[in-house]
Image: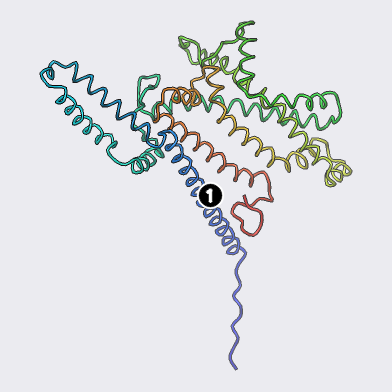
Amino acid sequence: MAATQAPSMQSPASVGTQSHTSAALRIIRYTLTRLIALFLTTVVGVYLTILIANMGGHVDEIRRATIREGLAIAIGMSPEYAQLTPAQRRQLVEELAQIEFKRLGLDQPFIVRSFRYLGNALVLNLGRAEQLTSDSGSSLVRNIILERLVPTLLLTATSFFFLFFVSVFAALGLSRRYGSFLDRLSVALAPLSAAPSWFYGIFLILIFAAVLRWLPFGGMVDAPPPPSRWAYFLSVLKHLVLPVGAVVLSSIFIGIYSWRTFFLIYSSEDYVDMARAKGLPARAIERRYILRPSLPYIITSFALSLITLWGGSIILEQVFNWPGLGRLLYQAIQLYDTPIIVGDTIIYAYLLAITVFVLDFVYALVDPRVKVGDSGGRSA
């Protein structure tokens, strides 16, 4: 009679190690999949931007004509070519123009040039701007954009961190006082958020800069800039007040109204009533049973508002003369500076992709029901 083999037993430590390894592989696989999907979306958006900014190749035709015109003027004003006949000058202009076209890649079909532009654009290798320069005098597109990126991030981060915390705590306070005068007032003020931030910015400039003269009209720092770091910091802070105030006024009322509604919904759940019956402190109930479940919705609203600000910062930065990406894009559109337009759009696309990517993992941190990369249940 053959002996039966006893089933192998795994130790708890080995089971735990396998579980952690499986979770790590799942997270890595999900992260790579998500990154690839966001990258492909960004590539499509950037390529469409190139097609639109170049008007399907029309801007390159304008560049060719500009090169020919510049060469014709230079040859016509040079004494060295004075003895040439008009036909010979035209031939010389065309020969030199073809050399320049080949150097710039303008001798290739537009479909080929567009994919070359795409590859260079994704790494911000866009050469030199056609009209604009940085404050340091550089005409490299990468330097111009990176110089303007810091002011935009400063304005965006300051506005939305202030807006987030003020709106959340104000909404929590109003949810405790449902039906009070302040609660009814917040509901009545919610439609004021229909106006964009630059609309409020104009009124803030008229009141606090033109009439009261308490704050500067615009810019990022006094001219000339203060010599010390502390004075420079205070100057930037002073210039931030009005644009940040405009952003807050355009979003805070609807934010308080929306999040107050979420808090009221969750405060009427059965488990909240049970916690109150057990005698838990009101602060603990709000933190554990009201604020925590509603955080995914709050964070989603916050992220969408952040994306909206990046899209609407073009006019806001122009109104306040803020030296950021929005104002740069506005100037580039006016001057038909295609490399700047494409580069600015790429930065916005990258910022949006990063926001969406980080948002998935923030969901998993604030909501235990969300499992990153879990195919069997809810996944981020």
- The answer to whether 133 is drawn above or below residue 119 in the figure is above
Q: Position of residue 112 (x, y in %)?
A: 33, 43
Q: Quadrant of residue 261?
A: top right
In the image, farthest residue toward the right? 277
Residue hosting label 1: 34
Image quadrant containing the N terminus: bottom right
Residue 254 vertical position relative to residue 243 in the rendered view, above or below:
below
> In percent of the image, x 46 and y 24: which residue is there?
328
Compared to residue 243, the image places residue 377 above or below, namely below
Give amino acid for label 1.
Arg
Q: Is residue 103 left or right of residue 213?
A: left
What percent of the width, then of the height, locates residue 92? 16, 27
Q: Secondary structure at mark 1?
A: helix
Location of residue 126 by image quarter: top left
Eyeballing the image, is 334 above or below 371? above
Residue 227 or 112: which is nearer the viewer? 112
User: Quadrant location of residue 338?
Assistant: top left
From the viewer's perspective, tell me whether residue 175 is left or right of residue 135: right
Give the percent coordinates (x, y) of residue 104: 28, 34
Q: Residue at x 17, y 29 (%)?
A: 91
